[in-house]
Image (cartoon, rainbow, N blue to C red):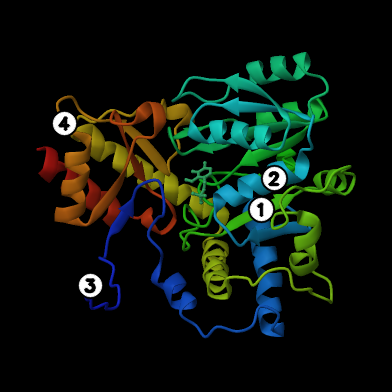
Amino acid sequence: MSTQTEFTSFIPPQRTLMGPGPSDVSPRVLEALGRPTIGHLDPEFIRLMDETKQLLQYAFQTQNPLTMPISAPGSAGMEACFVNLLEPGDTAIVCVNGVFGTRMIENVERCGANAIRVDDEWGKPVDPQKVEDALKANPTAKVLAFVHAETSTGVRSDAEAIAKLGKAHNCLVIADTVTALGGIELKIDEWGIDAAYSGTQKCLSCVPGISPVTFSQEAVESIHARKTKVQSWFLDKNLVMGYWGGGAKRAYHHTAPVNAMYALHESLVMLKQEGLENAFARHQSMHNQLKLGLEELGIQFVVEESYRLPQLNSVWIPEGLDDATIRKQLLEDFNLEIGAGLGNFAGKVWRIGLMGYSAKPENVEKCISALKAVIG
Ligand code: PLP
């Protein structure tokens, strides 16, 4: 017996995205996405690639020639950093203060390398003293890895201090900047970060599915000096450089998601036009406005103000309220998405994102008034 289904176009609802990502995508970026598709080796597309690289160098505050978007989400950027910089038998020190630190451990182990774990409590930043102790205890460690902006908790760690410690102990420093890029200060070159990966769906407010990455010269030399092949063909930087590396001749590596790259380019042009400092100030000022509204509702922050991320606000769910019921009501009655808690924080915490295009007064007002209506 067969049933016949009539399929029609998918029309998504118009949501306000205030979770941990994706964030609202600006109409400018959506418009760019719908422009005519051209070939991924078309001279005009190559011009867009060159500009995208320069714009990413601005966003990351780096001169690294190996700065490019990977045609896959943030998790692929994470994997690219680990598979290129680690070989079997290497040691990596990994800071864990939330979900994304634990994913780094997984990556290290899947490279056949040894992970030395430096734990900090969820909701607290990475403790540089513990990092220094681990570096001293493991003088042969090749990599030091940490998450700059831990999306699972809303904590900002001191990337500058951690990276400088790693460099002082001759490590290659890997930073997860998925939620940081475009939202808080990030200085790849000045701080000495050797490899960083990000995502397009957070403070860049672009469509999800692309991961900007950057590698220092020292990281590139380490990749060239490998004794073993990078175990992932797609993420092997030696190979993708032929396409993204610049120079007169571009060789086919994979078919780039052409229209998604238009969107990324547009979102980076928007960031450049606003200016990094102004973007950081806007995220902070929207956080301040949200904080006032939440305080009036009696909602408490999980993270202390001095290391709280303005773009990702973790708050304790007030006593007696059911997490899923409230989020469902916000979605159904107000078209508003806020995030659930992850891992240790599941059921206890909400994560309210103020990222990129979502970091604007109308969104803060909508969130506060919707919460007021739902929780009373
Ligand atoms: N790292 C951090 C800090 C994240 O917040 C995320 C996604 O939320 C990722 C890595 C993985 O990115 P993606 O979901 O784009 O694969």
If you read the primary sequence from the N terminus, does the residue marked by circle 4 or circle 2 appear first?
A: 2
- Label 4 vs label 1: CA separation? 40 Å
Q: Are the residues at dot 2 and dot 1 in contact (C-beta closer than 8 Å)?
A: yes
Q: Secondary structure at mark 4?
A: loop
Question: Compared with residue 372, is residue 61 higher up or lower down, i.e. above or below?
Answer: below
Residue at left 52%, top 65%? 267
The amino acid beneath tag 4 is: Leu
Quadrant of res 167: top right
Give the mark nearest the N terminus, 4 or 1: 1
| Residue for badge 2 | 81
Mark 3 → mark 2, Cα distance in angstroms: 48 Å
Q: Position of residue 148 (x, y in %)?
A: 57, 37
Looking at numbered disc 2 in the image, what kind of residue is underneath it?
Cys
Marking on residue 213: 1
In x, y percent, where is residue 52?
A: 65, 67
Dot 1, how many residues are within 10 Å of its Cα: few (below 14), some (14-19), or many (20+)?
many
Task: Give the foreground label among 3 and 2.
Answer: 3
Task: Please identify the quarter of the rendering in which residue 326 is found.
Answer: top left
Q: Quadrant of residue 108?
A: top right
Q: Which residue is mark 3?
A: 2
